[in-house]
Amino acid sequence: MAKVLIRSGAILLASLLTLTGAGTAQAAKSVCRSLPAGRVIAISPDVSLAVRTVGSGRPVLMIPSLGRSTADFDEVAGRLVAHGFMTILIEPRGINGSTGPAPADLFAIAADPDRVLAGLCLGPVDVIGHAFGNRVARALATAHPDRVRRVVLLAGGGEVPMTPPILAALSGSAAQGEKADAERLIDLQTAFFAKGNDPSRWLTGWFPAAARSQADATRATPVKAWWNAGKAPVLLVQADEDPIAPPANAASLKAAIGDRLTIVLLRHASHAILPEQPGAVVVALTRYLSGELPRASSLQRWVDAATVHPTD
């Protein structure tokens, strides 16, 4: 039934674009069906995904961090409504009603939103990947370039290896129900939250089995296979205290893709970014994704002005 509904929605969107004079999906403004109440959609016999949308207008797909749900985007998604955006939130396998076998690699994970978007939208969408989601976003842009308009990487690591203590803190952070919360708070502060920011906000909301599955898929995929994000323009929001995705990753990506990459520094933030600086993230997203690409210097000033200091 879910497949039929998605297919019917795509036909309806095609009719709408024809009536408005659009010749092709590429030439037309992107349009996506709204699913504010959410729906579990079967994209294959063995994979079903929980999907919901927030707002209406220009579509933006948001891909969450390792072992976490799209709820991490709720505050930012709510703020984007006022700026004329629709956010598309697809739960990864093993999280909040999404089911399916363990994915073989990052491209198998990226194929899930691609199949949802194929039935939900006409035209390319902007794609935002947070932390682990930055890898999936780039894999999606690489494997399905017609699906992606622009890419935003919030904490965009992957090439520079983590130190053993940071890797251990990342693992401990995700071990909800498997490790004492008092110890996990220390791990969260170490790996995810900048000095002065509250790590308890991420004490819950973890799905350890999904995290392990995603980590396995990451290890099975060569970094060079997804690193360049296809040919899409890319914004990297680089947190200044991020030990998981340190600035050397930004320098490496700049060397690889040149002027396609815009970098903005987010101060007083670490790998979590979303709960740490939601206002500054919204400013970066709205300024970058609306209209013409802004100059990096202008974008940096806007983000700096919206950044909350620990003593504010």
Image: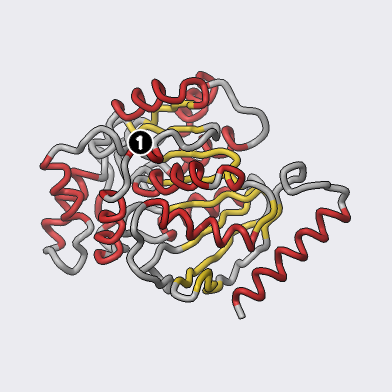
Circle 1 sits on which residue? 224
In the rendered image, residue 205, in percent from the top left (x then y), is placed at 32, 63
Which part of the image, by quadrant, shows the N terminus? bottom right
- The quadrant of the picture occupied by the C terminus is top left
Amino acid under disc 1: Lys
237 on left or right of 126: left
Q: In front here: 310 or 141?
A: 141
Q: Residue at x 66, y 74 (%)?
A: 5
> Which element carries disc 1, helix, strand or loop?
helix
Q: Give the side of residue 183 with respect to residue 295, left or right.
A: left
Q: Is residue 248 above or below residue 109?
A: above
Q: Position of residue 196 (x, y in %)?
A: 25, 40
Residue sitting at x 31%, y 42%? 222
Tell me if mark 1 has few (under 14), some (14-19) or many (20+) residues whose alpha carbon lies within 10 angstroms of its own: few
Residue at 16% in and 50% down: 187
User: Residue 189: x percent and y percent?
Assistant: 20, 46
On the question of residue 267 being in view, the answer is yes
Q: Residue at x 39, y 21 (%)?
A: 255
Above or below, 187 against 157 in this view is: below
Does residue 26 lie above or below 249 as drawn?
below
Q: Nearer the viewer, residue 246 or 239?
A: 246
Q: Can residue 312 be seen from the camera position used here? A: no
